[in-house]
Image: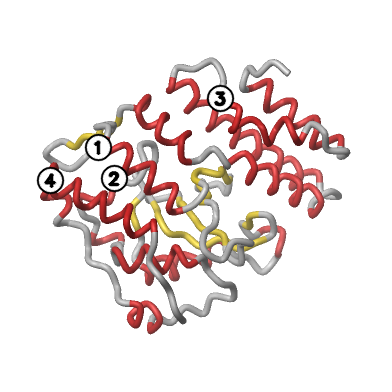
Amino acid sequence: MTFTKGLLTDTLNRIKVWLQSNYLVIAESIPPGLSLEEIQAIPRNIPFSLPSEVCELYQWSRGHNQETQTMYTCIFDPYESMALCSLEAAIALRPIFEDEIYECAIKYAGKSLFPIFQTDAENFCVVGEWDNKDSSPIIFVSKIGDMVNRYTSLTSMMLTLADCFKTSAVSFNEKGYTNWDLEKFASAYLKHNSGLLEFSLKRLKSELLMKQYDYVLRQRTIDNFINDIRYLDRERLNLGVEQLDFEVIEPLIIAMQNEDEPIVSLAKQALEKLNYNF
């Protein structure tokens, strides 16, 4: 296995440098990364490939186990305070997404999920066997199995965070808890994650085809899609703008030309939720 570090590592290092200059105690609490050899030596027994960004992330920091959380574990998201799992903890956690009955497994467009970040009951996951071998969308999975597209990739997630630090969108108190300026977060978030609707539409079309004869599963697919829109809409409102930039809503406008009427109908609903006049 060969691997070249890239933009993700550069961005993570920018984050660490900023923390060293502004919150040294938090920077010092970040566990060091694993070597490529150490990552390869960890038994995985995972029946699917992971994006190369995952390897890059764990070379920057090995993460933590639940019993060894540190101050830096709350820096990764303003809403969920997701902590980076150790690779061993993520592997141990993965089976809760699987089930002997395929329909009961938590899957994204028919593909398996692998947890990278977690709270006590929720996770950010990457998608196994994604079309792009380097990266995948980052999926928020709730404790009841609802899924929302949260970031377009690990790199876009960290670019969002780096911009938030640069613009003082996040600060820490003496205990390490974060305080976020949600308007500044929204600005960075929409800048780096404008492709999320494209992922949402791709998942919607794929899952509607797979679940076309099961009303309950189809409804969950639709609910997840609408939840994607609601999350983006929340960031739009935090930014204080009347509508999202055209580059964000363009995939929905294109979808309205789709011959599949359910897709057209859902795209129209989504645009209406964004108060976009079409």
Q: Residue at x 79, y 54 (%)?
A: 210
- What SS does tag 4 mark? helix
Work out whether 23 lies above or below 100: above
Disc 3 to disc 1, C-alpha distance: 27 Å
Q: Quadrant of the C terminus?
A: top right
Location of mark 2 (residue): 75
Question: In this view of the protein, which residue sits in the foreground, 166 or 75?
Answer: 166
Between discs 2 and 1, the one toward the N terminus:
2
- Residue 44 picture location, percent across and down: 47, 78
Q: Residue at x 24, y 32 (%)?
A: 168
Disc 4 to disc 1, C-alpha distance: 17 Å
Disc 4 to disc 2, C-alpha distance: 15 Å
Disc 2 to disc 1, C-alpha distance: 7 Å
Q: Amino acid at mark 2?
A: Ile
Location of mark 3 (residue): 244
- Residue 108 picture location, percent across and down: 63, 55
Disc 3 to disc 2, C-alpha distance: 26 Å
Residue contact at pointers 3 and 1, CB within 8 angstroms: no
| Labelled disc at residue 21 | 4
- What SS does tag 2 mark? loop
Question: In this view of the protein, which residue sits in the foreground, 254 or 142?
Answer: 254
- Residue 67 picture location, percent across and down: 26, 61
Q: Which numbered disc, 4 or 1, marks the residue closer to the eye?
A: 4
- Colour scheme of the picture: secondary structure
Q: Is residue 71 left or right of residue 163?
A: left
Residue contact at pointers 2 and 1, CB within 8 angstroms: yes
Q: Which numbered disc, 3 or 2, marks the residue closer to the eye?
A: 3
Q: Which numbered disc, 3 or 1, marks the residue closer to the eye?
A: 3
Q: Amino acid at mark 4?
A: Ser
Q: Is residue 247 left or right of residue 121?
A: right
Q: Amino acid at mark 3?
A: Leu
